Amino acid sequence: MTRPLLLFLLLIIVSCKKKAVQQYDLAITNAQVIHLETGKIEKQNIFISNGRIESVASVDSNDFKAGATVDASGKFVLPGFWDNHIHLRGGDTLINNNKNFLKLFIANGITTVRDAGGDLTHAVMDWKNQIASEELVGPTIFTAGPKIDGPNGSWAGSLEVETEADVIHALDSLESLNVDFVKIYDSRISRDNYLRSIEEAKKRGFTVSGHMPFTVTLDETINAGMDGIEHLYYIMKGCASNEIEITDKLNQGEIGFWGAMPALMEGYSDTTAQTTFNSLKENDVFVVPTLHIGHTLSYLDEVDHSNDEYLQYMGSGIIQTYQGRIRSALNASEEARENRKQLDTFFGKLAKSIDSAGVQLLAGSDSGAFNSYTYPGISLHKELQAMVDNGISPLDALRTSSVNGAKFLDQTEDYGKISKGKISDLVILDANPLENIENTEKIYGVIKGSQVFSKSELQELLNNSVMD
């Protein structure tokens, strides 16, 4: 073999052995990646293409090319936050206000929301599609569409059921709307139609969440197939040794919802509670504590919100919807005000007990029209802080957002952890939230699919969200 030919063959062999340089749309380098499933923090590079994570590798993996690079040295990266209970509602006159909320979520690192029922379904579906195609800035929306309730239900747009046929028709409507889950409310629905709605929705393969009429026991709700309990009133009822007695009085019209609260609080039993917690855990029922809004509403008579930073983003129409709860709080008797504050304290302790028992919690703000001073975006951070203030660890609190949110809606194939194949919804923080949960507010950047928002761009979203 001639020398030139030998050299040529050697060059071919060397070039074949040389590792091909990987190309990506985006590289996030030198990041302190918080893996919420374990609580472990690893210094890694994250490589993204076409809105999905292509690779998570050690920081010495430098054989790559990227269309853009974010140097996350000294920063902490975790899955984008989920707000697992919001409301997009208020009628046609508030459509623009609700659309404005979408920017507030992204500005706060919230890349996914669960819309727990409202009266703007067609607009919400339009926004959902535009966000998915990245034509509109906003979080991924999973929506219940209109709630199911009884005749003359409290909330506009609800599907009112009075007969078994009504239940079937309501669920047919929700299927035709292609909603992501079913939400059941408790203002007017009968106990039979409530349980029937859960059972029928489960037959159709829906995830179901909701309130619970106090004419029904928590065990009946769990046994019917409920997947998620919104708020802690209903958990408290199931933890009371006198639940059956109180339920009978409610069915006979001797007491009402708020009148039952002191008796149920007094009837709380550790033994009953542990049995209830075990049932929730065994049946894979999630619980949404909504502690921040509970505290906010409990102290409307004492706290002046007139200088709240986020009021400027709400607009006069949303602020007007706050007045009903404010009037109710100011006109309440001294006894009612004190009972509400005691209930707020009780719920904080109850949330901690639920978490300690291994029941899965969901972080949800309940933000939206009519829910006074509970602001879209920032309130999710306040919810996480309320959990930690009541003894839940920062790691467990963080899991209640993206990790448990993905589990609840059966979206774990795409969301909930930082690993190959997941949708690249990420938040980059300036400081470690495992050391101080308030660090979730120190946002350096947000990745939403293939969109990258720097700190200055997030601030610009806020600047553009100011409304008259």
Image (tube, rainbow, N blue to C red):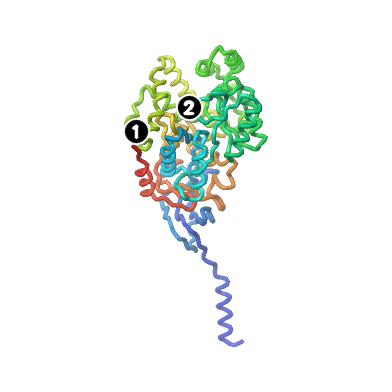
Task: Specify few, some or many for label 1: CA neighbours under 10 Å numbering under 14, 14-19, or 20 or more.
Answer: few
Residue 232 placement (x, y as % from top left): 52, 26
Which residue is at 42% across, 46% downward? 429
Q: Secondary structure at mark 1?
A: loop
Most distant residue in the top direction: 254
Front-lying residue, 90 or 142: 90
Front-lying residue, 126 or 196: 126
- The reply to whether residue 381 is visible in this rendering is no
315 left or right, relative to 115: left
Q: CA distance from mark 1 to mark 2?
A: 24 Å
Q: Secondary structure at mark 2?
A: helix
Mark 1, residue position:
308
Residue 27 placement (x, y as % from top left): 47, 57
The label on residue 348 is 2
Report the amino acid beneath label 2: Gly
- The reply to whether residue 183 is visible in this rendering is yes
Task: Specify few, some or many for label 2: CA neighbours under 10 Å numbering under 14, 14-19, or 20 or more.
Answer: many
Quadrant of res 219 = top right
